[in-house]
Image: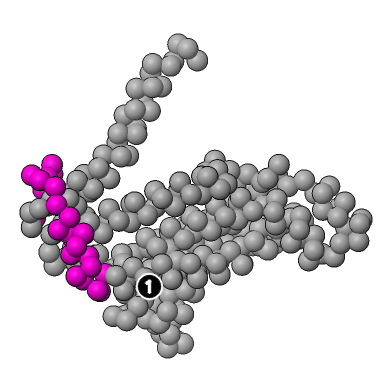
Amino acid sequence: MRRNGAFALVFNGIFALFMVAPLVVVIGVAFTPEGYLEFPPSGLSFRWFQAILDNPDFIEAAWISLELGVVSATLATAFAVPAALAIGRGRFAGREGMQALFLSPLTVPTVVLGIAFLRFLSLFDINGTFVGLVLCHAIIITPFILRLVLASVAGLDRSLEKAAISLGASDWTVFRRVTLPLILPGVVGGWVLAFITSFDELTVTVFIVNPSTTTLPVRLFSHITQTTDPLVASISTVVILFTVLLMVVLDRLYGLDRLLMGEGAR
């Protein structure tokens, strides 16, 4: 360990620099006083952050993305948790096929999913509606929740549930008072990853939105195709800061290692 310490330190430093450098550039560009992309900035200005407030379309799109992320992540969690409990603890025919079905959105290209969703939603005349977006996003993000909850279920001590049952607790009480608290880190971690994935989703969403349900990624993509001013950088900076704040809060409440690895409470 001591012999490889220097190499590991250099490697980790280069890797961290590779990951952080694009974010530093985006944040730096957001503070430029110029009307074009410039890094390093020639001065410090909040001009392009003020421009966000002067563009209500972006603010509306951000609220739509937030609402869509919350609703779709919650809906996906409602399906993924019982599915993970059944797959992780049950022994029944078709168990592997059920798991493959829930994880299949990860194996299909997003462009193919977008075209398929467009055709499917058009059959029921809900293409471009918020309900249609929620259904599509819930399907896309369910695998992220399922995998983390499965990790929590795998480490679940079932003797605690048996003890509760022996004391007369009903199935619902056992789930609410024992099982759910034990797998809660995996559920919360999956919900957070699902929310972030939904909030950032572009490829599938661009096929199924209309002007009244345009999300922030689609709005940013449309803006980039028309101009290259630093407004996109300022909006991206706000999203980055919001994400960092969310991670700090979650780390204080649960611990990011438990959330991202889906470890159950012990």
Identify the amino acid type marked 1.
Ile
49 part of magenta stretch: yes
Is residue 222 in sight in this rendering? no
Q: In this view, does 197 lie above or below 2?
A: below
Is 92 or 252 nearer to us in this picture?
252
Q: Is residue 77 above or below residue 265?
A: below
Neighbour class for label 1 at 10 Å: few (<14), some, many (≥20)? some
* Image position, residue 264 (x, y; %): 66, 46
Is residue 145 in sight in this rendering? yes
- Residue depicted at x 41% and y 22%: 8
- Residue depicted at x 50% and y 70%: 71
* Image position, residue 211 (x, y; %): 28, 80
Residue pointed to by mark 1: 64
Q: In this view, does 56 lie above or below 255?
A: below
The extreme top residue here reads 3
Is 203 or 96 nearer to us in this picture?
203
Quarter where residue 56 is shown:
bottom left
112 part of magenta stretch: no
Secondary element type, mark 1: helix
- Magenta region, residue range: 36-58
* Image position, residue 40 (x, y; %): 13, 42
- Residue depicted at x 8% and y 44%: 42
- Residue depicted at x 47% and y 12%: 2
Quarter where residue 235 is shown:
bottom left
* Image position, residue 57 (x, y; %): 25, 74
Query: How are the colours assigned in the image?
Result: one colour
